[in-house]
Structures are given as C-alpha cells and as structure tokens.
C-alpha cells in the first residue's frame, strides 16, 4: 500500500492524499460505507460504484465469520469475489461486535470467548485467530484485534485494557510476520490507538502504535457516547503523535459535522453505519441540514429530494413520494434514502478534498458545519 | 388507445400485437409488474425501465386511495408524476382489495362499505366513486368496478353477483360518459367478465361485456384457487366470445406456465404479484424451473444466478451470494430476487411474442412449459 499526501491545508491539519492498493486508489479524506455482512444494506454494488462512487467499503469480520462463514469466503477466493466488488475493502477485527453484540463474552489475556447473536453457539477470537480470519476474508486493509472500551470507562480499566490491546497488537504483528499472504494481492495491517478519553493514556497508546511503523494507523474507542468536544480533543492529541506520512483512520465516526471537524484535525479515513442506518429510519442528511422525511410537512412537497443531486435518486424522486414510501413501509423508501445519504457522505469528503487542494478548506468547513446543523 | 394485431399463431389462438397509449406503446403479449402503493416493491423505477424493461405497470386503486390518498395524487397531477413513471399505467378498480383485505365489508346494490386495513376507518366505494378515483389517479387504462367472486362459489351467488357486476358496469360507463377527462391524456376503460367457473355464466358475461364495445376487455374472477385446467377452460370460452380486435387482459394471472398457456388461448395482458412476492420469499423463476435460493444446496454454488442474464443481477451476483443475503435477511436479497423474477417474466412474454411473430410459438411454448415445471 502506498500513501501520498498531495496537499496540506494551511489553516488546519487537514490533508488531501491518495492511497494506492492492489484493488485501486482511494482518494483521501474518504468515507467508507459499511457493508456489514457482505452487503451495504439496501444498496446494489453497481450503485455503490456508479452512483455513490465509493472508493472503498468496510466489512465486519464478526458478521462475516458467522455468516456466510470464513470457509465459504475462502472457497470462493475472498470477499471481493463473493460479493463481486473489485475496489478496496477494509475489515475490522471483530472485536467491536464481539463486545457490543454477543452475550456472555469473556475477555481474557488469551482472547475473547463469546456467543453468536444468531444461534448462541460458542466461539473464541484471539489476536492470532482474528488475523487468520481477516487473511481469509481477504480485505485490502485489515485491523488489529483490540478492546474497544465503553464510555464512560474508569481509569484503571481503560489503562489495563490499553496495555492488553498493545500486547494483542504485538501478537497480531507476530502472527502476520510468520504466516504467508493468502491471495495474490497485498493486505495491509493497521494498528489501533485506544486509551478511552484519558489524555495520558491516549498519548501513551499513540506513541506505542506510532512505534509499530505500520502503513496506516487507526484511532478506536471514540464515538462511543462521549461529547463531540472530547472526541475532537482526543483525535487532535493522537493525530499529532501518529506518523504524518501515513493515513489515519478514525473508526466509527460519525455525523457529517464530526467528519469535517476530524478532517480538520488530520484524519484521512472514516466509517460509520449512520448514513445507512438513519436512512432506513427516514433521516436524510443534506448540506443544509437533516430531513425527517416521515414528517407530515413533506406530504405534498413535490420538490425533488435534494436539488444538489449527488446521486440519481435526489432528482428522480420527490420528497412527497419518499415520505409516502416510508408511510407505506415500502422497501424502495429505505433504498432511496440509503443511496441519498451515502451519496451525500461521499460528496462531503470529496468536496472537503477539493477545498483542501484549493486552499479553501477551513472557510468552507466552518460554513458547512453551521449550515448542516439544521433541521429542515 | 389503439390496438393492432401484428401476427396470429397458426397452431394456437396466440396473437402478437401493439397497444398505443398517450404514454407510449405496449407490445403484447405483456406482463404488467404490480406497483401496489406507487412502488413495484424493492425495485427502482429506473430499474423497471432500463433493466426489466416493463412497458406498463399496474397500480392498486384501493391502496392508492388510502395512501398517499387521492387528493395528493390529484395535487401533483396523477400517479405518473407522483412516482416519476412516464410509461403506461393500469389501475384496478379497488374491488378486489376491498373484498380480500378489508374487514366488515358490506356489499349492496349501491356499492361496498369497507374498513381500511391501515386504520380501520370506514369508506364507501360505488362504481361511480371508483371511476372518479381512477380518473384522479390518472392511469392510462382504468378498470370497471366489479365483484370478484371467490372459489368455490355457489351457482346462485355467482349468477346474482355477475348480474350486479353488469349493472355496476353500466353505471361505470354512464359516469365516464358524463364526466370530463381529468388530465391531458386519454384514459381507456376496460370492462370485466365474471361468472366464476360456470360455463353458462361466463358465456353470458362475455357476451354482455363484448356488447359494451370497449377498447379492451378483461377477464376477472380467475386465479382465485381453482385448478389450472378450469382456469384455461374459462379463458378459452371467454376469449372466443370477446372481440378479436381488442386486447384481452386476464387479471391476476399467474405462474410462468399459466401465462404461456393463456397466451395460447388468446390473452394479451397479464398482471400478478407472484414474481415480486415470491422473490421476497427467495423463490426464483427461470426458464429451467424454480429455485428456492434459501436452500442449503446453493451455499457454495458460486455460479451466476441465471446464465440467461435477463437483467444485470443475473450475471453480477452468484447463487451462493444471494443465498447468503437471504440467510442474513439483507434487503439486497429481496431487491436482487425481485429484479431477477420481473426480468424473467418480461423476457418470457417478449420471447413468446417473438415466437408468435416467427410462427414457432406452440412448439416453443410446449417445450418451455415442460422445462419450467422443475425444481432446481
């Protein structure tokens, strides 16, 4: 994997860059749509490519491991082939879902014992095992197996957990060094900074992670309920320590405003279920604020969904029609809203990139942040 | 509306024709995807046009009347504009849904009192009122308000119901003659033959309907549970009485085999929820039989969904992937299966048309009927 920084903003820490993987280039800053179980919910792969124009998508190791199962993915030659997606993919390590979805999980030094949310069956993930599964899934970027601490988290727990995450990281690196690549393309490994919302821990963790010398680095354990200001404070602290010449990925973030603010702090990559999950609940993001399309006020508003027209749905369908689809619980409503929101998120990061390259990022960002903080 | 017959099959009563409406041409025989509540479930309008290539779709008056409501459709200028579909639309009269969906309906000479399946509110449909609503919805082809008798149905009930349907038909015609068109395009009226599975009643009804001199005629009250042979017997009887130079629409039919057999008997138009409803349950229709994609046998079958490739989904996605989407209850599964099945139904009627024009219909039909009667 290669990463080239093309431009740095003079008034902030924002950067415009380009990542090159064996499945193609990723222009940064980038937002990665979440394709949990080998599908970005309610969206065709063709729409992701041709309409939304996503450079890279994310898969969840926990979900893929349980269904369709690692063996199936291995048999077909990896997730790219299974879902017929030929652009880059990133997989998380499974850790986050193990903590948030499964019952009676037990975290030990060796790894995590958990029960499937599907059938209650018992499973065990260790750092080594997560690496093995991710090799078989075959993402272009694979993530360290870490513990994502909740918010709030007491200091001692956060500190011990961070140290365990660091020891797990060493085990991940060791396993990857001693096991061959699986497919005929390069898989790049990103370690993850933890440390909850404690500055000293975040500094320690960022230094530890920077020391690994990985081709990219991630910030985990944020966007888990803490106030946005606290998130920004941690991001800034960590970004200033992580290598400047490697991409920085802020995991699970966030709202359009969160994304712009974190770009300003030096983050290059984002993922979040928000655009698709909120879409399925009838919430649309636009450059002028959010729309609850279920609201009666749209009942006879026959104007197009979004005049800015990021994707075909924005100008093909009207607000009144989309509202009707939600009222009638029609699948098409969720499909339209999902395409709209992802199209908007991708527009947002591409527009941010343009402004970084043009030297107008901060001014634009400050305007957008105010403009988007509206309910239409 | 114009109807031209381009070719008649020599070995059957099949015809290839062309209907011209103010929203474009319809090549017959044709299958009309059902867009109950202003949406063909899980399918974008753009996919209906560009991938499935549907010449015409159907809307349900009962559903549209309740949601988004007639007033909204009137305000925007009709259903075409509301859903942004510029090809022809046909609406049923609301009768069928009133009988099958609503509680405590009361059928009287004047019309039908019923309760909404959405909120239990009381409503009343008369032949005149149904015509008024259909004018406002603005379909290119609107249907008579009739009573669809169940199967089995006792002779006296079927006879009395048929006579009431005929009296209602006269009231529909009278209302249409005395009320102006609503939009700047022509709306064509089709009366409906009833008479359950009684030959003498079907003959009487077909003669009554033929006498109206409408621009097209429909056969209702079939595909309601009777054996296929009984359906074919009624269709043949009725088609032989209905005017040869007008399109014949067999309502609510059916399986791919039903469609081919009825084309052979002289039917030109079909609609059915089967391709979309069964798709959402994981059942795929193909030229070589049906596939239950949920079956474990497809778990690691990485071949494409359908090599015949009627639509892009058929060759873009594999059987194993589609099976996984159903197992994981992903929306995309229903979307893919719906596009596939509709693409197949439209391929089937287009292929039938080609064979009628080429003089090879019966031979082809007999082969397909055997071939499709398989579980893969």
Image (spheres, coloured by chain):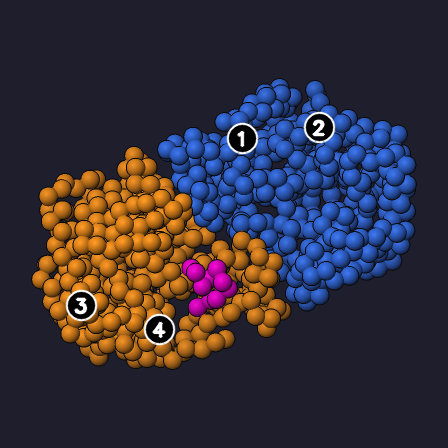
Chain colours: A orange, B blue
Q: Is residue A115 magenta?
A: no
Which residue occupies the foreground of this view, B54 or B40? B40
Q: Secondary structure at mark 1?
A: strand
Question: For the residues carrying marks 4 and 3, which lies nearer the camera in this image?
Answer: 3
Badge number at residue B290: 1
Q: Secondary structure at mark 2?
A: helix
Q: Disc 4 and disc 1: Cα gap in Å?
A: 49 Å
Identify the residue position indicated by label 2 in the image.
B228
- In x, y percent, where is residue A102? 35, 53
What is the quadrant of residue B126 in the picture? bottom right
Identify the residue position indicated by label 4 in the image.
A257
Mark 3 neighbour density, 10 Å: few (under 14) some (14–19) many (20 or more): many
Q: Which chain is indicated by disc 3?
A: A
Residue lying at 81% horizontally and 58% vertically, measured from the top left = B124
Identify the residue position indicated by label 3 in the image.
A159
Mark 4 neighbour density, 10 Å: few (under 14) some (14–19) many (20 or more): many
Q: Is residue A365 shown left or right of residue B144?
A: left
What is the quadrant of residue B365 in the picture? top right
Give the extent of the magenta segment: A276-285
């Amino acid at each position: 994997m290669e990463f080239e920084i093309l431009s740095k903003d003079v008034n902030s820490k924002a950067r415009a860059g380009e990542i090159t993987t064996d499945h193609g280039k990723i222009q940064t800053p980038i937002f990665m749509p979440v394709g949990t179980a080998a599908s970005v919910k309610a969206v065709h792969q063709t729409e992701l490519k041709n309409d939304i124009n996503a450079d890279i998508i994310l898969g969840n190791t926990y979900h893929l491991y349980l269904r369709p199962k690692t063996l199936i993915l291995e048999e077909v030659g990896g997730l790219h082939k299974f879902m017929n997606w030929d652009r880059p993919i990133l997989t998380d390590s499974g850790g986050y879902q193990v903590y948030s979805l499964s019952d009676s999980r037990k975290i030990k030094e060796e790894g995590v014992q958990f029960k499937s949310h599907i059938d209650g069956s018992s499973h065990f993930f260790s750092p080594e095992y997560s690496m093995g599964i991710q090799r078989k899934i075959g993402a272009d970027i694979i993530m360290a197996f870490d513990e994502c601490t909740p918010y709030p988290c007491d200091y001692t727990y956060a500190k011990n957990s961070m140290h365990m995450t660091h020891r797990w990281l060493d085990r991940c690196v060791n396993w990857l060094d001693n096991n061959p690549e699986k497919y005929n393309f390069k898989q790049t490994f990103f370690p993850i900074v933890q440390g909850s919302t404690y500055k000293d821990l975040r500094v320690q963790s960022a230094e530890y992670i920077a020391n690994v010398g990985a081709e990219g680095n991630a910030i985990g354990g944020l966007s888990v309920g803490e106030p946005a200001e606290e998130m920004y404070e941690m991001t800034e602290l960590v970004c200033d320590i992580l290598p400047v010449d490697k991409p920085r990925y802020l995991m699970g973030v966030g709202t359009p405003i969160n994304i712009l603010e974190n770009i300003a702090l030096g983050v290059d990559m984002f993922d979040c279920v928000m655009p698709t999950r909120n879409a399925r609940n009838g919430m649309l993001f636009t450059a002028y604020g959010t729309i609850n399309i279920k609201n009666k006020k749209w009942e006879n508003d026959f104007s197009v969904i979004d005049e800015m027209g990021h994707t075909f749905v924005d100008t093909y369908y009207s607000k009144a029609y989309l509202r009707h689809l939600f009222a009638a619980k029609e699948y098409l409503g969720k499909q339209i809203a999902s395409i709209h929101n992802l199209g908007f998120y991708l527009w947002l990061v591409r527009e941010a990139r343009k402004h970084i390259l043009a030297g107008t990022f901060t001014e634009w960002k400050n305007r957008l942040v105010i403009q988007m903080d509206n309910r239409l």
